[in-house]
Image: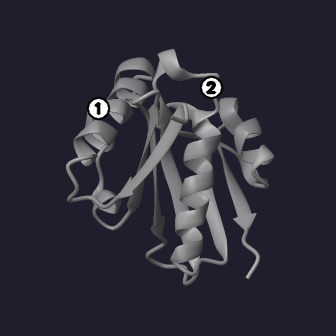
Amino acid sequence: MNRIEISSFSYDDKLMSEAYRIRFAVFVDEQKVPAGIEKDENDAIAKHVLAFFEGNPAATGRVFPDRELDGVARLGRVAVLQEYRGFGLGLAVCKSLISQAEKLNSHKILIHAQVDVEGLYQRLGFKRIGREFFEAGIRHVEMVLELNK
């Protein structure tokens, strides 16, 4: 058995409750993001992934088509439970989400990346665009990944 296994799913799947559990543990409990903004209307249109580490739900993320920019996907809500950091789960989740964006026929992926994990996205080919800004009280930067079509 691989140490990391990825499942992709839609909003109405039973795995969504595990994704929310991880997101709330990381963003709300750990990073103090207001609980009221953690769930949003994009969850319903997103493709979600859940990463299992040795069978345990450990990380999640989502990707969805931008509502205003044709051919652009938005990647986000990438969260890895604290006890599972350092095992490559963030990279595995992002690679799966990039694959999902390609299936959506996206030519570009945008992300509001937390500055503290900007290097993770750079390793995947994302490039910083614009200046740093605060979102939910946390320093972010917008990044872009051009997909080869």
Residue 53 coordinates in the image, percent (x, y): 48, 29
Q: Nearer the viewer, mark 1 or mark 2?
A: 2
> What kind of residue is marked 2?
Phe
The image quadrant that residue 41 belongs to is bottom left
**Image vertical order of residue 116 relative to residue 97, above or below:** above
Name the one closer to the observer, 110 or 81. 81
Q: Residue furthest top?
A: 83
Along the line of sight, the residue nearer the viewer: 120 or 59: 59
Q: CA distance from mark 1 to mark 2?
A: 20 Å
Q: Which disc number belongs to residue 21? A: 1
Instruction: Return the residue at label 2.
Output: 87
State the image coordinates of residue 23 (x, y, percent, origin top left). 37, 35
Mark 1: which secondary structure? helix
What colouring method underlies this structural image? one colour
Q: Residues within 10 Å of mark 2 (few under 14, many from 20)?
A: few
On the image, which quarter does residue 89 sit in?
Answer: top right
Q: Residue at x 71, y 39 (%)?
A: 120
Pinpoint residue 28: horizontal percent, then vertical percent.
35, 27
Q: In percent of the image, x 79 and y 45: which residue is there?
A: 123
For the view shown, which residue lies furthest in the front direction? 1
**From the image, which quarter does the C terminus lie in?**
bottom right
